[in-house]
Amino acid sequence: MNDQMAMVLLAELPGWLQAAGWGALSASGLLIGAVGGYHLSLQHTTIARTMTFASGVLLAVVAVDLVINARGAASLHRTVTGLLCGAAVFSSVNWLLLERWRRRFSVDGGCIWLKNLFHAGSKDERGRPAEYSENAFRPASM
């Protein structure tokens, strides 16, 4: 069966069945990721890099969609200016939040305290549950 024949057969399917097929295809990535996350033991840096890449791709897709809509409503100059101003505001607020976070919490160990906080049954050095440990949210000033 060639590609044209397959496209003709797919086009003849009812609309609800086509929608269900595309929905199942798009949801399969979530299921594959859930199964992989359940069975694989990944390092913290691998998870952080993957999440960073995925969030960057999501922001890029949203930005492209907004730029296409803005370009239809305004001139190229205004569209580019708005895009650059939005990127500057986003980057500035991101930097300010990161600096506030670094001043408030100790950054020793990265996000290990999150891992300890949310893993059931994890204990601190005194044998208490990690969520009750004074080190779980340790401010940098202490």
Image: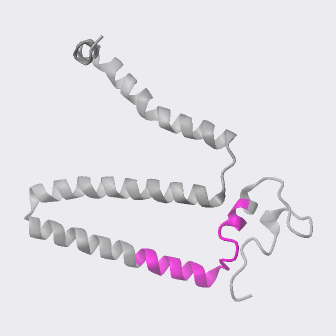
Q: In which image quadrant can residue 64 be found?
A: bottom left
Q: Quadrant of the C terminus?
A: bottom right
User: In the rendered image of this protein, does residue 14 appear above or below residue 110?
Assistant: above
Q: x, y percentage for residue 119?
A: 76, 55
Q: Is residue 130 left or right of residue 52?
A: right
Q: In which image quadrant can residue 102 be found?
A: bottom right
Residue nearest the viewer, comparing 93 with 3: 3
Range of magenta residues: 93-115
Identity of the residue furthest to the front in this view: 2
Residue nearest the viewer, comparing 43 with 71: 43
Q: Quadrant of the N terminus?
A: top left
Q: In which image quadrant can residue 127 be found?
A: bottom right
Would residue 92 be counted in the magenta stretch? no
User: In the rendered image of this protein, does residue 25 appear above or below residue 138?
Assistant: above
User: In the rendered image of this protein, does residue 94 appear above or below residue 35?
Assistant: below
Q: Is residue 7 left or right of residue 52?
A: left
Identity of the residue furthest to the bottom in this view: 141
Identity of the residue furthest to the right in this view: 126
Q: x, y percentage for residue 107?
A: 65, 77
Residue nearest the viewer, comparing 74 with 28: 28
User: In the rendered image of this protein, does residue 105 appear above or below residue 128?
Assistant: below
Would residue 97 be counted in the magenta stretch? yes
Query: By what rule are the colours in the image chosen?
Result: one colour
Residue at x-position 71% and y-position 60%: 115
Residue at x-position 27% and y-position 14%: 2
Q: x, y percentage for residue 59?
A: 36, 58
Residue nearest the viewer, comparing 94 with 56: 56
Residue at x-position 59% and y-position 55%: 47
Chief SS of the magenta region: helix
